[in-house]
Structure formats: structure tokens, C-alpha cells
Amino acid sequence: MSQFRRGWAISCKDIESYYGKPPLITWGLLFPAVLLLSVYVKDPATYLAIAPGIIAMTLLFGNTSMAAIVVTFEKRAGTLQRLLLAPLSIRTIILGKALSASAYGLVSALALSLGLKLALGMPLVNPLIFIAGLMLGAGCFSLLGLTASVMVREVFEAMTLLNFFRFPILFISGVFMPLSQLPTWLQPVALASPLTYVVELLHFGVTGRSEFATPVIPLLAGLLFLLVSWLLAEAMFRRRAYA
Amino acid sequence: MAATPAIVVSGLSKNFGSLKALREVNFSVLRGEIFAYLGPNGAGKSTTIRILAGLLKRDAGEVSICGADVAQNPVLVKERIGVVPDESNLYPELTCRRNLEYLGELYGLRRRVRAGKAAELLSCFDLADRENTPFGALSRGLKRRLTIAAALVHDPEVIFLDEPTSGLDVASARALRELIRTINRQGTTVFLTTHNLYEAEDLSHRVLILIKGRVAAQGTPREIRQRVQGLNLLAVTFSQEIEPTHLLRACPAVLKVSPQNGSWCLEVAEAHAALEQILAFAGKADLRLKEINTVVASLEDAFLSFVEGRSQDSEARP
């Protein structure tokens, strides 16, 4: 419990120092909002087909980038060493960093969703599944951002490394077109992407429909990816954070 | 001073590939003492501190800090130690008070305790009027002070100070040395690494000299000076300028000549023979000896003697 409290303290401090800054929140909201509005202006009937994908994409880019930037910045400033010198387990440090990044992603995605609901009347058929999708995505993508950040020294290196992962999965995860419309050979590859399950959970939440027959499959797959991301982040922190 | 050890290191070894950074290092630091860990660049000082602070795994040997092994119980050990790295690395965007309170949180202090501790440290380190100033806006000296204060927020039993006065002006460095003495008087064991040998001699109860990953010498500064074998120093002032190479050629017992405040500092193999040769040299060159004194070797002299391999402690002998 004591370690959890310390992890919570890391999160609160990171929100105070980084994530709570107005320019960051605005940046996280403006880009997806403008993208969705431009689709809506072109054809109001089809924006719902890509809204969940754009929200998931916001989570993917926002969370991976911010988690990576914060840790890389702290490595350079020497303040990450403060955490390593304190009586904290590696898990506590990862938890603290991932919680704050996830909170940033969740707040941005929820604000975007609320804006879409108020401005464009976006439905929310199953809010619980929608929230679950956001939480799984925020957690998973934050952990992947943390993993990338301890593997490199500079922010641009972290971004380059992440882009090798982010851009390919953007095209295979049902963000812009349904999984069923992907080429047959690409469909199994889509199942290896965590973004696929986040997008499908958000589709369930918004429209009540998805490429999967039941939300249980993307929920379980999302949980599996969350676990794998955690193990990956932990292994990388143990190997590289002290370097 | 209680004579129980705060730190016990035995057979500590660490390799980085083919580089042997530490080779069977043994030492202990008693509770309540200031222990200076000295060595030239690349000797293995930082590697030792990183291992003791739980930032680096050792290859061999035992390390016990306050009775616990840092590799087995890193969280327990880290609760008992404070570390001041060579770079002041607190959070630049947080105020002085918030930095101390945040670190108190990381050490599990309750809200009221950490608020009280932050106020106490700000006052003790003469930073009370800067409590709301962001760390990044402080001068180098004040940053150093706050970094030391931050290492004390949880009342550690041992504090590691890596180059505490590096880059500070004379007044700030002196004030900081006084603070280190105060911390030590309050019962905290101080493990100090510094390149400033005056500082090491001035502050420390005991000294260890590390060279190429091996312990070259350890003891009190006085013992270290006395262990320097064959190091006799003379300070000589001649009536006129001399050419040091002529002196060296004429006086085989003189090993090294270096200028020192208008006179010459001579390192000699044997004082009596050297004196006779210097007098003969002065007579031949028609010089008067204005002043001649024996010089007590400083810790710096002893350190250089070890670094240059002119002296060896028993521990360093094969």
C-alpha cells in the first residue's frame, strides 16, 4: 500500500508538472477535433464510422508520445535518477508514470467525446464499454511509450522508434476502414495490434456494433495486451533505466 | 563516535566488458564519521557510489549498508541513505518547498511530517526566503544547498556526497563545508567523494585512495601522509633566479623541482644528502640561500605520490 501511495505521488507530480499544462491539453484535443469536423462537414452521415477510430488514434499518439517525452526529458534532466535513488520498486515507478500518462489520455479522449456528443450529437450506446476501451487503450499505449523512452536517450529517437510501430498499426487496426474490408491476408495481422481492440471497444460503446460478435473478445484481448505491455515496460526498465 | 560500521564493503568487483572498474575493493565506514573516497578520474569512485546507492549491480563481493545488502533489499537500504549526485538534479519547475515535500512523499513521510521537515530544512539551509522560488531559478550554490537538503528529508543514517562543492565560489564552498560538518555532528555518516583534496583533508575523519579500481591506501589523513614513503619536501629560496634543470643535474638527491610562491619546492630522496648537494650547488653558482624549510606533506602530496606510483600502501601490494 505504501508503494502504491508513492506511485500515486509520482502521478500527481507529473500531472502538476507536465500533463496539467493548458497547451498540452489543447494540443491533444485540437488535432482530432479538427480531423473529425472536416469529415463531418464533408459527409455528416459517415463521421460516426470513423469517430471511434479517431478517438482511439488520439489515445495512441497522445499517450505514447507524452509518456515517452516525460521519461526521456527526466532522463536528460537527471530527475529520473531521483526516482531510482528513492525507496521505490521498479513497478512503483512504472505505475506512477503510466497512471499520469493514462489520466492525460483519458481526460483528452473524454473531453473529445463529450465535445462530439454536444456538438454533433454522437451517440453513446454503451458508455461502460466505451470507458473500458479508453482505459485499456490509455494504459497499454502509456506503457508502450514508457518502454520506448527507456530504450533511447533523446526525445526524437523515442518518437522515431514509436513511429515504426504507430503508423503501420494505424492502417491495419480498423481506424479508417472496418476490419472486414481489409485485404484477407491483412486481417490476421490486424488481430496482433492492440489498437484493433481499442477501436472495436469504442465502436461497441458508440454504436453498439463491432466487427466482433461480442465485446468480451476485444475486452480480453485488450487486457492481454495491457499485461504484455506492462511486462515489456518492466523488463526494459530493469535493463535500461539504470544505464 | 560509535564504532559500529555503517558501510561494509568486501571484495567488491565490477567489470565493464574487459575493463576492470573495481578490483576486490574492501573498506568500512564507521557510523558518525566523514569518510572521503578519493581517486583520479576513472579510478572507480562513481562506480562504487552507484553500486552502494543501488543503481548498479556488482559482479562480486559483499556490500552492507546499515546492516542490509543493497542488492537483496534495495528499498530498505534506500530508505536509510541519502544521495547527493555530482549534478544538482531536483525538479526545475517545482518550488524549493514542493521539491522537498515531493521527495518526502517518495520516502513515505506523512503530509504533516514532510511539511514540517521541509520547513526545517529550508530554515537550516538558509533557504526559507526562497521557499516559493522554482529550483530552476536558483543560483548554482543555492541549487547545491537544496540538493543536499533534499537528501536529508527522510533523516538518512548515511549520506553520499558526490563532489558537493564542485563549481561553487569560495564563500559558498566554505559555507557548504560547514553545513556538511553540521550534518555530521547531528549523527549522519558522510561518504564524500571529491577532487578537492583540501576539502577532503579539512572535513574527513578517514580517507581512502582508489587507483585503477584498487584501494591504494586508507586511514586518517595524518596516517595517509605518514604512509607516503620516501617523500621528503624542502622549500628553498635562492637569492637569484635559477634554472631548475641545472639544480637537478647538480643534485642527484633532488628528484623533482617545482616553483612555489617565489621559492622552489624540492622533492628529495634523502634530506641530508640533498642539503649538502644544494649547498654545494649554491656555492658553485655564487648564490645565497635565503631560506630553506622542510615541508610537511599535505594530503594532496600524498595523493599525487600514490597516483604517480611512488608510494604503495600494504593493501595495494601484490
Image: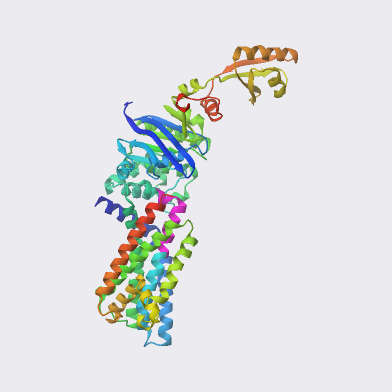
| Residue B313 vertical position relative to residue B21 in the rendered view, above or below | above
Q: Visible in this render: residue B94?
A: no
Residue A66 forms part of the magenta stretch? yes
Q: Which residue shows up at 48% across the image and 56% down it?
A: A153
Work out which quarter of the rendered image holds the N terminus of chain B and state it. Answer: top left
* Residue A238 in picture, x, y percent from top left: 37, 52
Q: Nearer the viewer, residue B113 or B268?
A: B268
Q: Nearer the viewer, residue A125 or A153?
A: A153
Magenta highlight range? A65-81
Q: Which residue shows up at 26% across the image and 74% down it?
A: A217
| Residue A204 vertical position relative to residue B239 in the rendered view, above or below | below
Residue B263 sits in quarter: top right
| Residue B182 vertical position relative to residue B137 in the rendered view, above or below | above
- Main secondary structure of the magenta stretch: helix
Q: How is the image coloured?
A: rainbow
Q: Which residue shows up at 43% across the image and 82% down it?
A: A38
Please give left or right for residue B276 compared with residue A220 in the image.
Answer: right
Q: Visible in this render: residue B227?
A: yes
* Residue A121 in picture, x, y percent from top left: 32, 83
